[in-house]
Image: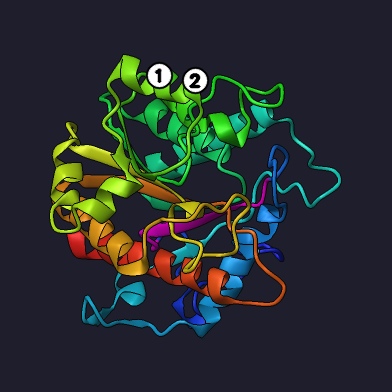
Amino acid sequence: MQISEYSIPFIGEESQAPYKQAKVVLLPVPYELTTTYRKGCETGPEAILAATDQLEFYDVELGKEVVFETGVFVHDAIADTRQPHHQLTPDLMVEEVKAKISHLFADGKFVITLGGEHGITAGVVAGYQQVLSEPFTVVQIDAHGDMRHSYHGSIYNHACVMRRVLEMGLPTLPVAIRSICQEEADLIAEKDIPVIWAHEIVQSPGDWIEKAIAQIQTPRVFITIDLDGMDPACMPGVGTPQPGGLDWYQLTAFLRQVFLTHEVIGCDVMELAPLTESVVSEFTAAKLVHKLIGYYSDSK
């Protein structure tokens, strides 16, 4: 397995580990077909990887160079809608992602999937479920509920991804949610989904993380991060921004606690849609990926 012409090394060539030695695999999935507002998330994975060239190897919070400790391999991109010959329908994309994730996870890799639209996560989660015999919790960082049954004629629309996860029989913990429809509100009430609302985070800045962690009832966790879960003041380059999200330190403090208290089996970082006039969003996303690698490394 080699780096493709598409793939860009994480923080430069010297940090790129061979596949067999790498503990962490970054899987770019530049797929975009169902986005409904601002377009451009198919360019997100490449923008994140390119921005890592400006990162420092040293993590100030953890006090070490985590990349060399874990070994990082950048996988070939899959389901690339920028390639005319690879225009998968959403259901076929989910199957391709599922097959790849299950293979990488079975190989013992900690995979961070880089999107692409949030609908990709349905395939990612299905891939883990195919390998694991016991349920795990999907922790969702997001501005939106993403729990509609269908949207714009597709059950695999990015606005439906967490509904597909719930249908897999997996518990979820949505965090920083601040935009839902009536259908989603009814579903949350019916299934008693333990949502951590964005306004509650502001109202209880001292204990919301503890409250959120207490809602996770399984030893294993998968973390899906839609970057619009962050406040657009910190992360403007997303397709569907909503005011009032998490800032950098709220997000990283929460993620750190999840890694310290549970076995995180994988993560994804979705929906970066870079802006032409600013590199803030892609650099912040790149640093977030670096933090996820560090938290994984530090939890071992």
Callout 2: few (<14), some (14-19), or many (20+) C-alpha neighbours within 10 Å? few
Instruction: Give the residue pinned by disc 1.
Output: 187
Counting from the top left corner in percent of width and height, residue 152 is at 71, 26
**Are discs 1 and 2 less than 8 Å apart at CB?**
yes
Q: Residue at x 26, y 31 (%)?
A: 194
Q: Is residue 276 left or right of residue 203?
A: right
Instruction: Give the residue pinned by disc 2.
Output: 183
Counting from the top left corner in percent of width and height, residue 112 is at 44, 53
Q: Residue at x 43, y 58 (%)?
A: 230
The residue sitting at the right extreme is: 84
Q: Secondary structure at mark 1?
A: helix
Magenta residue check for 255: no
Image height check: is 189 above or below 137? above
Counting from the top left corner in percent of width and height, residue 191 is at 31, 17
Counting from the top left corner in percent of width and height, residue 130 is at 41, 26
Residue type at numbered disc 1: Leu
